[in-house]
Amino acid sequence: MREIALAMGLLASAAFAQETPTAAATRFLRAFEHSDFATVRSLLADDATVIRTSLSPKGSPQNQRSSGAAWVQEAETNHAYLRDLKLDLLESSELRIDGGAVVNLRYRFSGLVGPAGKTAFMSDGIDTYILIPAQAGWKILQYNYIERLEMPRGPGGER
Amino acid sequence: MRAVRSIVVAVAFVLAAGPVLAEEPADVAKRFLQLFEKKDFAAIRGLFAPGAVVSTVDLSRTEPPKVGQQAAGEWIDGISKELEPVAFNGIEILETSTLAFDQGATVSIRFRSSGKAGEHTFTNEGIDTYSLTKVDDTWRIVRYGTFERLEFQ
């Protein structure tokens, strides 16, 4: 049984080694959607950095800088309060140079938040992934995103 | 006749004002690169939104990539000093992509640049990424990222 699991793992590694930068970035985003933080962590390089740029209809945009490890930790904690997550991948672009690639993904992310899970949220944004090739496939060296998060009233009037 | 002249003046005014009013996110990014070529850092500073940040990745053929983040103002202060010895820097835009939603946009530009610093020539290949939002109805850079390999010959 262990041999089969090992073989499956090796096959998966071989498949990821051949995926495109856009496929790796999409896998990261889908893993985030499904709260699969083991996959999210596996795609980040050891010294990865993250910048979140949040927009609001009122006020200046805010940039929040963190290490990849700290960002994943926070996201994992926050996901405990989210449910019915849905991520629509709307558009993508990929540019490459010798030694790396930049992938941009435009998305709409929605779901329910809060202890009672009755407050809807929606986020429109664009992810930017800076990737470098590694032995087991592409690794994300920088993950940056710009988004506008909206939390309209829930069915029970919650905010 | 006077009415025709008024229309001509009005059309000329609109045409003159048009490019500034209609500047799109990719235009701002391209203007950034033109200003960078000229080392006009005062004008570059004006393209950033308040609180903007810069992220950098320096690729090397012999060492692991170097990753950094800093405030846009600090980055401008540093790069303007670093480029003091550069006599010429020509930037060629090879490929551009723009994704946008109603309040924000991200532009990536693949470029190749070459120039001269003292006795040395250099080439630089990379991808710049600009995330922009509207500040006072004008697109401004809220995050700029550079991902490049600089090589001296």
Image (spheres, coloured by chain):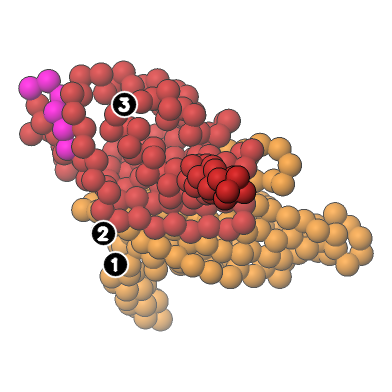
Q: In this orientation, which residue lies closer to the viewer: B112 or A27?
A: B112
**Rendered-image quadrant of the N terminus of chain A:** bottom left
The numbered mark at residue A17 is: 1
Residue B147 belongs to magenta span:
no
Q: Label 3 marks which chain's residue? A: B
- Of badges 3 and 2, nearer the viewer stands 3
Picture coordinates of residue B71, whole percent (x, y) = 49, 28
Q: In this orientation, which residue lies closer to the viewer: B87 or A60?
A: B87
Secondary structure found at label 3? loop
In 3D space, how far apart are the residues under numbered discs 3 and 2 (Cα atoms)? 39 Å
Q: Quadrant of residue B36?
A: top left
Mark 2 Cα within 10 Å, few/some/many (few <14, many 20+)?
Answer: few
Q: Which residue is mark 2?
A: A135
Point out the tag, 2 or 1, that comes first from the N-terminus: 1
Three-letter code for the amino acid on which mark 3 is drawn: Lys
In 3D space, how far apart are the residues under numbered discs 2 and 1 (Cα atoms)? 7 Å
Q: Colour of chain A?
A: orange
The residues colored magenta run: B114-119
In 3D space, how far apart are the residues under numbered discs 1 and 3 (Cα atoms)? 41 Å
Secondary structure found at label 2? loop
Q: CB atoms at circles 2 and 1 under 8 Å apart?
A: yes
Three-letter code for the amino acid on which mark 2 is drawn: Gln
* Badge 2 and badge 1 in a common chain: yes
The numbered mark at residue B39 is: 3
Secondary structure found at label 1? helix
Residue B115 belongs to magenta span:
yes
Name the magenta segment's main secondary structure.
strand
Mark 1 Cα within 10 Å, few/some/many (few <14, many 20+)?
Answer: some
